[in-house]
Image (cartoon, helix red, strand yellow):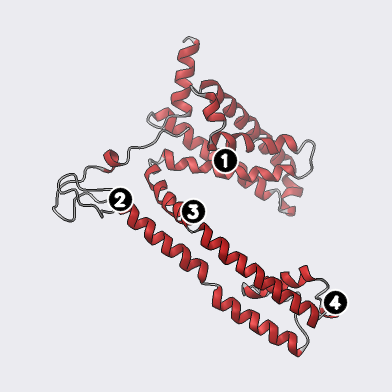
Amino acid sequence: MNYQQLREKLYQIIFGTDTPLGQRFDIFLIYAILISVLAVILTTVDALNSRYSTTFFVIEWFFTGLFTIEYALRIFCSPNRPKYLFSFYGIIDLVSIIPSYLALMITGAHYLMIIRLVRVLRIFRVLKLVRYLSEADVLMRSLHQARRKIFVFFSAVLVLSTLFGCLMYVVEGPDNGFSSIPISIYWTIVTITTVGYGDITPHTVIGQLISTLAMLTGYSIIAIPTGIITAELANEIQREKSLYPCPNCVKAGHDRDAIHCKWCGASLGTLEERHPPTKAL
């Protein structure tokens, strides 16, 4: 087997999902990621870490070495190395192995290995579920369309929080826990969002009246972002339906997974024909 044949074979195994070896490799990779992440989580449990610290250390560096070799092989066999290196998964693959090496210089950096969990998203490709990622695209486009409204809303909330915070600072003062305007603004945001930690509470009658007004304001505005996003999501779903016209009567308004036209009954084609799978790195 020459150099080029080796690269092609490795590419089919590491990047491909159409071959048995490629599917087994991806499934093995997902299990390895889950085990390595579980090991990182368990190291934070003192009772386990004190007894099995050596085991956890070996597991951590075993998987770090394994993922480092895998990352090097991906670079080696990739036909377009810059595209892979700067792709979403290429960056995640790199970032997932860096924390272990950083931990040699920075204490606690290895906990950042939890980012390896993002690599499990490859399961969509392994299980042929890439088409379902388009549903996430609809949600992301809805959020993008609503970004200005959301920005205006949060700006208004920030202004209200600042006003209430200043009032509480003047009325309650440092003696009652409102030691500065930023602390008072923090209290206002906690109150408006109905979280209510209770670490700072008003003691004067006027302060309690202001806090009551802040709570009522919070209940009044808490549903606004949901309404904005819901409206944009409905518009995006309707826009999505208009993208699939019937080839027979040319009428649109079909769901993404529709098989027949709801107007004339003609076939709309298979899902694979209308949504060809994209080749992921």
Pointer 2 residue: 256
Q: Earlier in the sequence, mark 4 or mark 2?
A: 4
Of circles 4 and 2, the one toward us is: 4
For the question of whether residue 197 can be seen, the reply is no
Q: Secondary structure at mark 2?
A: loop
How far separated are the C-alphas under marks 3 and 4? 42 Å
Q: Earlier in the sequence, mark 2 or mark 3?
A: 3
Q: Earlier in the sequence, mark 3 or mark 4?
A: 3
The tag on residue 182 is: none
Residue 67 drawn above or below residue 5: below
Amino acid at pointer 4: Pro
Pointer 3 residue: 144
How far separated are the C-alphas under marks 2 and 3? 21 Å
Q: Residue furthest right?
A: 175
Q: Earlier in the sequence, mark 1 or mark 3?
A: 1
Pointer 4 residue: 174
How far separated are the C-alphas under marks 1 and 3? 32 Å
Amino acid at pointer 1: Ile
Give the image quarter of residue 196: bottom right
Residue at point 69%, 87% (across, down): 209
The tag on residue 33 is: 1
Residue 61 spot, x, y in % from top left: 68, 34
Who is closer to the viewer here, 147 or 56?
Answer: 147
How far separated are the C-alphas under marks 1 and 4? 50 Å
Q: Is residue 132 left or right of residue 26?
A: left
Who is closer to the viewer here, 153 or 39?
Answer: 153
For the question of whether residue 85 can be seen, the reply is yes
Give the image quarter of residue 271: top left
